[in-house]
Structures are given as C-alpha cells and as structure tokens.
Image (tube, rainbow, N blue to C red):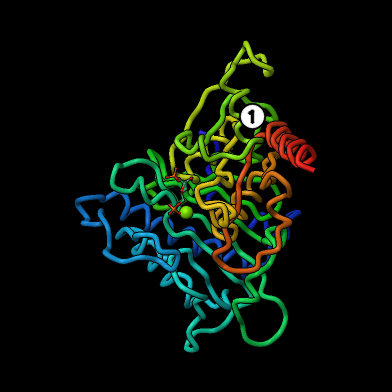
Amino acid sequence: MSKRISLTQYLIEQQRGEAQIPSQLRLLIEVVARACKSIAISVNKGALGEVLGTAGSENVQGEVQKKLDIIANEVLIEANEWGGHLAAMASEEMEGIYLVPNRYPQGEYLLLFDPLDGSSNIDVNVSIGTIFSVLKKPEGSGVSEQDFLQAGAKQVAAGYCVYGPQTTLVLTVGDGVAMFTFDREQGSFVLTQENVRIPEDTKEFAINMSNMRHWDAPIKRYVDECLAGTTGPRGKDFNMRWIASMVADVHRILTRGGIFMYPWDQREPGKPGKLRLMYEANPMGWIVEQAGGAASNGHQRILDIQPSQLYERVSVILGSKNEVERINAYHAASAQQQR
Ligand code: AHM
Ligand code: MG
C-alpha cells in the first residue's frame, strides 16, 4: 500500500510549499476538521444517539431547526472558540456574529459555517454535511459584522465535510482542491485525492424540477434543451440528479462533473435565491473554481459579489465550466431581448 498522508501532514506541506499558509491558518483548519469528526460521530449514531427530529426552534431566517443543526453548531463553536486563531465566527444557525470570549486569546481569522447543510435529509439517512469558509479579519482593533462582509474572492480557506457512506473532507487553501477520507479506526483524515478537476463538459444536471413553473426564461431554456436529449439542440442525452444536500450534489460534481443550479425563481421575487452567499455559495464557489469549474449567479461570478449582509441569499449556478458559461450566455441573451 502506498504511504498514507494525513491532513496534518498535507497542511504542513501547504505551509512549506507554494500556498505558504500561515501556521495559525493550518491550526484553524485542523480544529474545524476535528469538529467535523465529532459531528460525523453524532450523525452516525442517528436514532441511537437521540439526535434525529426537530429541536422545536427556528433560526434567524425563520427555518425550523433540527436537533443536529444545533448539535453541529455547538460542536463547531466549542471546538473553535478557545484556540486563539479566531477573532469571531458566524453561523447560518445563529443571529449576528459570535465573538471569541474575552477569556481566550484573539486571533486574526474569521470563520463562517453552515453547521449542517441539507437538514431536510437528516431524518431520512441521506448524505448531509458541514460547509465552512475562512476570511482574514481586516486590520484594526475590535471586530464587527462589517468585517465579515468581504467578497468570496477574499477567502483564505474553504471546505466542506460530507457525512455519507464515507465521511469526506474537501478543502482548498487556494492551491487546488484535495479530498480526505475519515479513517474511523485511526481517528484521522487521510488524503485520498489531490488536484481534483471537474470536467469542462457534462451530461448531468442537478436542479429541483418541482420548481420548474417558477423559473426564469434562461433556466427554462437550458433545462428544456437538456431534456430534449439527442433530438434537441444539444444533440446528447442528459441525466438528472437532485439530492437536496448541496454538499452531496457538489461532491458528485467534483467527482464526475455536472452542473448544480438553485436559481432565483418567481416564488418570492424579492429574494435573490434560496442559498446563502456567505455560508454556502462562496465556499462552494471557490472550491469549484479551484477544481477548474465555474460559479455564477447567471450574471456575475459568485466570488465577485460584495455582500451587504451576513444572511444574503443568491442565485447559484456552478459546476462544469462550459455549462456555466452557456447558462450565463442564455441570461445575457435574455437580458438583451428585454431591452
Ligand atoms: P439548509 O442549509 O437549510 O439545509 O438548506 C440548503 C439546502 C441545500 O443543501 C440544498 O441544495 C437545498 O437546500 C435543497 O432545497 P430544496 O429542498 O428546495 O430542494
Ligand atoms: Mg445549508
């Protein structure tokens, strides 16, 4: 068997090599990974650990919280608050930012996370995950919500951990994408794939088709053309997948290509989309770009969007580059027609 490389070893190499990540960032990523192991263990216990079902509360965005949403959030906070790497955290499940308590040393990084993405899949034993994003705190004393409002292009690390048949951690520090599989017997993440690349073309798309009647014209056009298969303008048959866990859908795309869409639709016209820019779209967008794919809202690169608030939502189209570009072109053509 070839030599196994642990997450720690990989990160130390990233510290010494091209990416030159600071040791504080390395330690921060290790703490997040440790928290993910602990979440994986809770997820795995399911009904035996009494972790399934709703918690009887709502988050700041008015969504019903599951017990595991709250457990995962607490695990991430507790693991990260005392290490001295962070100035503050922000979570999809909490209101406002979480300052590192005064009794602990303050660091220079900001951590954002969606503690348990794909919550609707928890109770049905389908893959779910944790998504995280790391930003550098702007210079100056103190820390405020404003400090978090940085475009995705400013991220210094991003990743997700998918809790599925295997627990896999996927990470970028700006030097490509690496995947680590959790070895339960050893208790460590082991490097299982480096230089992940998303094929530029694909024959697989992911979208919640039940929203079809609400879509905007460019999305309808794209999906109609996929559905027309060999007899349509694309001249090939497409396959469709929708797991309803962004982590699992994005993981499939990183593994074998494809396109993922959660676009703006007419259900709530005032809302730019369902997914959250800072907790979901930015980290996933950067990972996808680092693997040679693209991420857009139909009009603009996701990573260039300047957030105006922590819980900002966004239309998301990401995956195989040529498909994302095609959908961008359909949006541009539609805007042109309306002029
Ligand atoms: P969550 O963070 O509350 O779990 O919501 C995000 C999830 C994504 O993982 C997934 O792509 C999407 O919501 C599924 O939405 P829908 O149930 O509308 O298909
Ligand atoms: Mg989510």
- Check mark 1 vs ligand 1: CB closer than 8 Å? yes or no: no
- Kind of residue at disc 1: Arg
| Left or right, 177 with reference to 5 | right
The residue under the point 57% across, 57% down is: 270
How far from the left and from the top, in percent, is residue 220? Answer: 60, 32
| Left or right, 185 with reference to 181 | left
Is 40 drawn above or below residue 56 in the view shown?
A: above
Is 89 drawn above or below residue 5 in the view shown?
A: below
Label 1 neighbour load within 10 Å: few <14, some 14-19, many 20+: some
- Along the line of sight, the residue nearer the viewer: 79 or 23: 79
The residue under the point 48% across, 33% down is: 209
- Along the line of sight, the residue nearer the viewer: 296 or 97: 296
Disc tally is: 1
Q: Quadrant of residue 311?
A: bottom right
The residue under the point 29% across, 60% down is: 67
Extreme front residue here?
339
Specify whether residue 9 is in view. no
Specify whether residue 252 is in view. yes
- Along the line of sight, the residue nearer the viewer: 227 or 317: 227
Which image quarter holds the C terminus?
top right
The residue under the point 49% across, 62% down is: 32
How far from the left and from the top, in percent, is residue 302? Answer: 68, 52
| Left or right, 326 with reference to 94 | right
How far from the left and from the top, in percent, is residue 173? Answer: 66, 55
Residue wearing tag 1: 221
Q: Quadrant of residue 326?
A: top right
Per the image, label 1 sits on a secondary structure element best described as helix
Is 134 drawn above or below residue 170 in the view shown?
A: below
Extreme top residue here?
231
How far from the left and from the top, in percent, is residue 313? Answer: 57, 57
| Left or right, 300 with reference to 109 | right
